[in-house]
Image (cartoon, rainbow, N blue to C red):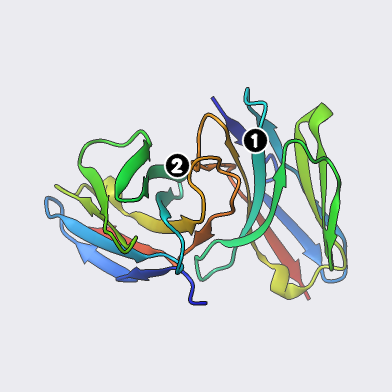
Amino acid sequence: KAGVTQTPRYLIKTRGQQVTLSCSPISGHRSVSWYQQTPGQGLQFLFEYFSETQRNKGNFPGRFSGRQFSNSRSEMNVSTLELGDSALYLCASSLDRTSGSYEQYFGPGTRLTVT
Amino acid sequence: AQKVTQAQTEISVVEKEDVTLDCVYETRDTTYYLFWYKQPPSGELVFLIRRNSFDEQNEISGRYSWNFQKSTSSFNFTITASQVVDSAVYFCALSGETSGSRLTFGEGTQLTVNP
């Protein structure tokens, strides 16, 4: 079974621009979560989608948004990029979204650099 | 609120030594789940283990073992006879009935195994 895939792997953007990151979950997984990883803040939860609905959201400004498609693929968007948005963005998929009991499998991440 | 603490920021050992990574957690949930992930330099988080709050049985998988103690809110990870390939950042994480699939991560422990 193929793992979680994320595209692109690397991205360089300028302040003020917007960016869209893509995530394809493991086949059969319906829950997709996004995390931001930075040296200063560590791994932080952005949001989770299940059956095309956002079920959980972390403490990030409205510039961070996402969506999920009927095939469970997910995208996240960051508008009006700031230097502090430079980070590794990780996507994770899992079978169950309600109990949290099922392990989440992570993709390789997208390394975003904002200049 | 949930919290995970990994007090050891960096650990350096010589190959074949045993090493234990500490993890202490805080949660008010009765049902919760603990995880360990490995992050090699490539960046992808690799799932290692999931443990439910109602199952305190320790687990061994090859050179890896985990000690879960609810009385001290700890979920420690031991690598026996460490190898250079074990060098990575290791994260302990927590989710619970009130947080759904949202994982709360510790700060991570950088393990370096020297030949």
Is label 2 in contact with label 1 (beta carbons under 8 Å)? no
Q: Residue at x 42, y 58 (%)?
A: A90
SS class, disc 1: strand
Q: Name the residue beneath numbered marker 2.
A: A41
Check disc 1: other Cα within 10 Å, few if <14, some if 14-19, many if 20+: many
Q: Chain of mark 2?
A: A
A27 shown above or below A57: below
Residue A8 horizontal side relative to residue A29, left or right: left
Residue B21 is situated, as x and y percent measured from the top left of the image, at 76, 49
Q: Residue at x 58, y 67 (%)?
A: B40
Q: Amino acid at mark 1?
A: Tyr
A25 shown above or below B91: below
SS class, disc 2: loop
Q: Amino acid at mark 2?
A: Gln
Q: Residue at x 21, y 47 (%)?
A: A82
Report the Cα–Cα distance between label 2 and label 1: 23 Å
Q: Name the residue beneath numbered marker 1.
A: B32
